[in-house]
Amino acid sequence: MSSNIFFQPFVGKDYANGGIFGKRIMILGESHYCDESCTDCGDCQLPRECMGFTQQVLDDYLNENKERQNWMRTFLKFERSLAGGGN
């Protein structure tokens, strides 16, 4: 069977057991921004380099040992809204 999914989704470690806070949550983004040298973007027949992009971004965000960067603020807002935290 052929798949038209270009970016593989991130599935958290708790998803199969009911999700986080007892809920399975899907966050759908509008777009990804690849490196200018990427020639595979958007071509479902050539997903080599970009296929794991979403998974790597979330792995980086969830890694407590990774240095915090500006792009991570968007995910922090989602995290705080789920946990009932403030801005």
Image (tube, rainbow, N blue to C red):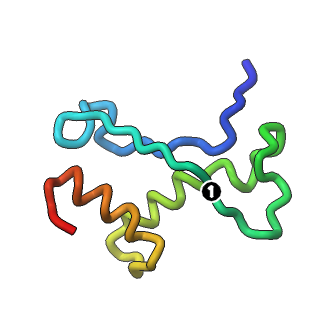
The residue positioned 46% from the left and 66% from the top of the image is: 60
Left or right of 87, for residue 54: right
**Kind of residue indicated by mark 1:** His
Position of 48 relative to 66 (above/below): above
**How many discs appear?**
1
x and y, in percent, of residue 33 in the image: 66, 62
Residue positioned 34% across, 44% down in the render: 13
Q: Residues within 10 Å of mark 1 (few under 14, many from 20)?
A: few
Secondary structure category for the residue under label 1 = loop
According to the picture, the residue beneath numbered tag 1 turns out to be 32
Spot occupied by residue 54 in the image (x, y as percentages of width and height) = 55, 52
Can you say whether 35 is above or below 53 in the image? below
Q: Is residue 58 left or right of residue 24?
A: right
> Residue drawn 33% across and 38% down?
25
Q: The N terminus lies in which quarter of the figure?
A: top right
Residue 55 at what x, y percent from top left?
Answer: 52, 52
- Most foreground residue, 17 or 21: 21
21 with respect to 31 (left or right) = left
Q: Is residue 6 above or below residue 77?
A: above
